[in-house]
Every structure is written in structure tokens, then in C-alpha cells.
């Protein structure tokens, strides 16, 4: 395995690198080798205060980021995109050794990161034309228009599964809107987010517009979320942490957007092309080592094809290449950390003890002696009360249940606290249309699973979160609407009689 050198970075505050006040650092462990390969700075409440103050200055000073035009901001977003594309292979390798995802996926993520910045550059430019849009009102003596203004200083707290991409989904629209931001990536995968700071320096992004604080949730994330001078929190991560953030935000009536967990279903009907349906079933659950919030990890398959389907599913699963994630063609890499690895193995052993059958996988691949590797796992004989069916595993684990009727399939699909994604696979497009209406999810895929586009809204219902990212919706997250009304007549209003 070739060594990937990890740059040694500090916190990024007010346009410059700053050592954390308490000088603490956190080791980076490569999940494929279990070796320490570097370290990241660990921010604490003291550093949060300095970063929030820098963002507040950049937002409020006379020539502030908030007062610039959308087209001015777009130039920076495009420059960031270009730099990321220029460095995409290096950034991809850093992400691989930091979080264990296959190199082909990491490269594709970097292209998506650049695409996201370019997309929001276009939306920033379009925002200029959307200012002062007149509102039609039924009184001729008044004129009303609307201003869309940046919401202020925003806290962006992001997860470890797509480190730079999830950061881009928040940073790009926040900056496009004219907000200033503090990004707090997960301590399990912060390397590429610190490189985003270097990119911001390279393109001369004005100081304080984007500040990047790495560190632990309780020490850096919590003081950021509760900071009185933060105007909004956008969070992607676990439902449990989402609840904490929502509770914190309530104390100061802060707006929030939350993209949380999922336990999404994929419904496969008896009229499908088996190989097509199988590939989408695998693609819905095993990319990124199964660490996908929207993974369609509950397979509901029609009883008439279930035996054949599962048999072929195992054949396909056996051909998934599990290797050092830096190897080209790797399709399953290492789980992000020892903690997550143990958690997944516990889920599998609990499923077994509750009476489920581990039909395939569930163990370390024999050819890999170290690293947090786990074979793609297929579990059957699952009842709806089992932990493995109800809780998010966040690993390469697929549960299988059969159904007899469309009604039963819908009932099983919707019987969950979550509501992020859902997929339906069938040649009967009328059936697909019916199901898209009744499946309780923020995203429904028809004859596919997981495709995601910058232009289309992303987010969930129920315990999967609040609000939508991406598309125009992603920009609206960071804008506030101001009504401006002017009395246009020279006549006295005439409500009170003159003295």
C-alpha cells in the first residue's frame, strides 16, 4: 500500500491557521491498516468563541460578505470548485486513508463536491435578479416587494461518511446566500475539510467568511450549537444528536435544518428483471461500505421470486471486491472506526440471538487480517420487532423480508420511525406511481436506489429530519425573507381626524 502523506494543519479561523488555545490534537487512524497516520487539531469552547466572533465580523462589517452581490460571491465558489478539481486525486486519497471508502467512490465524491460549488455559484448569480420582486396587492396606494437576505452566522455540523461532500452541501449554499459560517466536521474524518481551508486561502476568500473547527462533538460541536451569536444550525448526523441540537436551538429560537438517520425500504415486485433489480438492491446498501444515511437496507421482495432473488443476490455479493480501499476496483473498503466496526458486529450478533439467519457475510473477509473490514451481510428470517429491522446499522448489512400483496409491502415499508428514502422496483409504472404517493419518505426512487442530484431536494420526514438540502431548497435554508411596503399616495391616510 502506498503511503499518503497527511498535511499537518491547525484550526482555520479568520482566514488563517491557528493552533487550538488548549493545544490539543486528535490522532487520525487509517481504518484499513489500524495505524495512526497523523493528527488533527481539537477545538474547544474557547476556539469556538474566536471563530464565531470572526464570522460575525465578516458578516456585519461595512463591506461585509453579506452586502456583496451574488455574482461577486459566485466567483469565489467557482474558484473553490476549480481548485478541488485540480486536487481531486490527492483529496480523494486523503479521504480514503481517513475514512476507508473505496478510491473510485472518493474520486467521484470530489467531482460531486466541485459540481455542488458550481451549482450554487449559478444560484448565487440568479439571486441578484430575484431581489425586490414586486408582490401584487389589492390596494393601489401601496407598493410591496420582498428582499431575500442571508440569515447570518451559521453553524454547519457534518458527518464522517462523505466528509467533503456533506460539507459542500452546506458550505456552498450558505456562502452563496451571503452567510458566514463555521464548519465543524466529524472528528472521525476531518482531513479533507481542513484541506478545504487551504483551498479557501488559495482563492483568497475574505477572512472570517468560512471558519473550520475540527474537534470532538461535546468539546467543539456543543458550544458551537449553543452559541448565542450563531443564527442558524445545519446538522447532518445521528437522530440522537439531532434531538440534542434541536433542544439546544430551542433555548434561543434558532432555526435548524436536520438530516438524520434512516432505515429505508426497497420494494421489489415479481415482474422485475432480476439482475437489474439485484444490482440496484446492492447499490442501495453496499456503497461507501454501507455507511449511507439513505441506504435502502430493508429489502421487501415478493414471495413468488424471493428464493431465486436471494440466491442470485448472494452470488452477486460474493463477487464484490473487498480490498485495501486505495486499490482500483475496490467496491467495499473499511468501516470508518473501531467503534463503528464493533457496533455493526454487535447488531449482527444481536440479530442472530433474536433468531434471524445470517445468510451471507457478517464476518471479517479471510484474506484481510487487519483493518475494520466486514463482508457484505444478508440477513433473513427477520421479524419486524427485531433490532436489526428497526434500527439504523450504518454498515453493509441488508435485511430481507417477503410480502404477498402490494398493501402488505406498503405497510411493512412505512412501519418505521424514519422517512428518508424509499425505492420501488417494478415494470408496472402505474403501480410505481401509486407507491410514490403512499411511501412515507422525503425521496422516492423508482427502478433505482440512491441517485442524487444537486438540483433536486434532499431530506427526510419523521425521525429522518427537518428541511431540505440541495436545489433551490438548499439555498432557501440560509435566506430570510423581508417584506418592504411603501405608501405611494400624497393623500393623508385619513384614519384619524386632524385636530
Image (tube, helix red, strand yellow):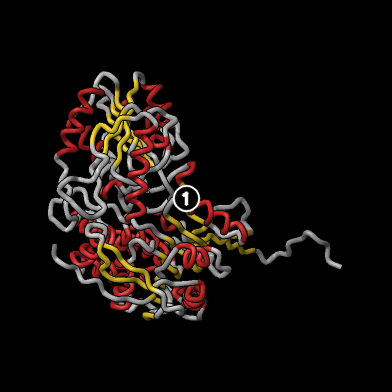
Q: Position of residue 214 (x, y in %)?
A: 39, 69
Q: Is residue 218 visible?
A: yes
Q: Position of residue 175 (x, y in %)?
A: 40, 67
Q: Is residue 86 visible?
A: no
Left-right relation of 37 to 235: left
Q: Is residue 393 above or below residue 496?
A: above
Q: Quadrant of residue 93?
A: bottom left
- Front residue of 335/283: it is 335
User: Mark 1 highlights which residue?
Assistant: 467
Q: Is residue 496 above or below residue 62?
A: above
Q: Is residue 462 above or below residue 247?
A: above
Report crowding for label 1: few under 14, some 14 to 19, many 20 or more residues within 10 A (C-alpha): many
Q: Position of residue 469 (x, y in %)?
A: 40, 53
Q: Quadrant of residue 348?
A: top left
Left-right relation of 295 to 227: left
Which residue appears at 46% of the width and 57% of the height?
477
The count of marks equals: 1
Which residue appears at 17% of the width and 45% of the height?
366
Q: Quadrant of residue 207?
A: bottom left
* Circle 1 SS class: loop
Q: Is residue 418 above or below residue 83?
A: above
Which residue appears at 39% of the width and 80% of the height?
18
Q: Quadrant of the C terminus?
A: bottom right
Which residue appears at 21% of the width and 48% of the height?
332
Q: Position of residue 305 (x, y in %)?
A: 24, 21
Q: Residue furthest right?
A: 499
- Front residue of 360/229: it is 360
Q: Quadrant of the N terminus?
A: bottom left
Amino acid at each position: 500500500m502506498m503511503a499518503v502523506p497527511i498535511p499537518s494543519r491547525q484550526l482555520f479561523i479568520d482566514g488563517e491557521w491557528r493552533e487550538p488555545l488548549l493545544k490539543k490534537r486528535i490522532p487520525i487512524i487509517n481504518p484499513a491498516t489500524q495505524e495512526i497516520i497523523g493528527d488533527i487539531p481539537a477545538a474547544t469552547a474557547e476556539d469556538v468563541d474566536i471563530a464565531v466572533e470572526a464570522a460575525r465580523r465578516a458578516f456585519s462589517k461595512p463591506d461585509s460578505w453579506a452586502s456583496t452581490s451574488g455574482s461577486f460571491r459566485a466567483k469565489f465558489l467557482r474558484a473553490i470548485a476549480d481548485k478541488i478539481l485540480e486536487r481531486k486525486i490527492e483529496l480523494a486519497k486523503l479521504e480514503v486513508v481517513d475514512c476507508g471508502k473505496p478510491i473510485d467512490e472518493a474520486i467521484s465524491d470530489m467531482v460531486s463536491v466541485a459540481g455542488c460549488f458550481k451549482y450554487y455559484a449559478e444560484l448565487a448569480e440568479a439571486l441578484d435578479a430575484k431581489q425586490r420582486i414586486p408582490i401584487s396587492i389589492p390596494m393601489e396606494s401601496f407598493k410591496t416587494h420582498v428582499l431575500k437576505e442571508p440569515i447570518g452566522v451559521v453553524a454547519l455540523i457534518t458527518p464522517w461518511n462523505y466528509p467533503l461532500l456533506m460539507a459542500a452541501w452546506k458550505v456552498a449554499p450558505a456562502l452563496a446566500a451571503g452567510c458566514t459560517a463555521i464548519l465543524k466536521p466529524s472528528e472521525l474524518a476531518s482531513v479533507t475539510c481542513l484541506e478545504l481551508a487551504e483551498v479557501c486561502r488559495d482563492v483568497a476568500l475574505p477572512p472570517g467568511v468560512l471558519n473550520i473547527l475540527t474537534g470532538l462533538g461535546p468539546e467543539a460541536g456543543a458550544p458551537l450549537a449553543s452559541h448565542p451569536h450563531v443564527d442558524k444550525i445545519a446538522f447532518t448526523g445521528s437522530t440522537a444528536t439531532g434531538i440534542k441540537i434541536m433542544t439546544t436551538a430551542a433555548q434561543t429560537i434558532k432555526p435548524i435544518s436536520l438530516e438524520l438517520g434512516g432505515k429505508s425500504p426497497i420494494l421489489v415486485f415479481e415482474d422485475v428483471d432480476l439482475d437489474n433489480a439485484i444490482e440496484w438492491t446492492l447499490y442501495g446498501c453496499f456503497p461507501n461500505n454501507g455507511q449511507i444515511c439513505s441506504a435502502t437496507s430493508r429489502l421487501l421482495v415478493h414471495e413468488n421470486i424471493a428464493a431465486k432473488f436471494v440466491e442470485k443476490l448472494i452470488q452477486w455479493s460474493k463477487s464484490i471486491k473487498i480490498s485495501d480501499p486505495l486499490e482500483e476496483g475496490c467496491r467495499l473498503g473499511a468501516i470508518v472506526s473501531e467503534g463503528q466496526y464493533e457496533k455493526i458486529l454487535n447488531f449482527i450478533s444481536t440479530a442472530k440471538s433474536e433468531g434471524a439467519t445470517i445468510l451471507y457475510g457478517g464476518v471479517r473477509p479471510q484474506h484481510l487480517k487487519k483493518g475494520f473490514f466486514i463482508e457484505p451481510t444478508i440477513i433473513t428470517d427477520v421479524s419486524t420487532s427485531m433490532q436489526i429491522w428497526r434500527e439504523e446499522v450504518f454498515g453493509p448489512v441488508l435485511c430481507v423480508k417477503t410480502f404477498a400483496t402490494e398493501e402488505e409491502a406498503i405497510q411493512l415499508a412505512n412501519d418505521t420511525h424514519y422517512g428518508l428514502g424509499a425505492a420501488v422496483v417494478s415494470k408496472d409504472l402505474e403501480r410505481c406511481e401509486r407507491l410514490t404517493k403512499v411511501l412515507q419518505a422525503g425521496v422516492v426512487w423508482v427502478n433505482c436506489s440512491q441517485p442524487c442530484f444537486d438540483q433536486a431536494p434532499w431530506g427526510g420526514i419523521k425521525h429522518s429530519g427537518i428541511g431540505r438540502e440541495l436545489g433551490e431548497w438548499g439555498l432557501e435554508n440560509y435566506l430570510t425573507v423581508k417584506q418592504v411596503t411603501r405608501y405611494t399616495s400624497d393623500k393623508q391616510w385619513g384614519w384619524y381626524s386632524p385636530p
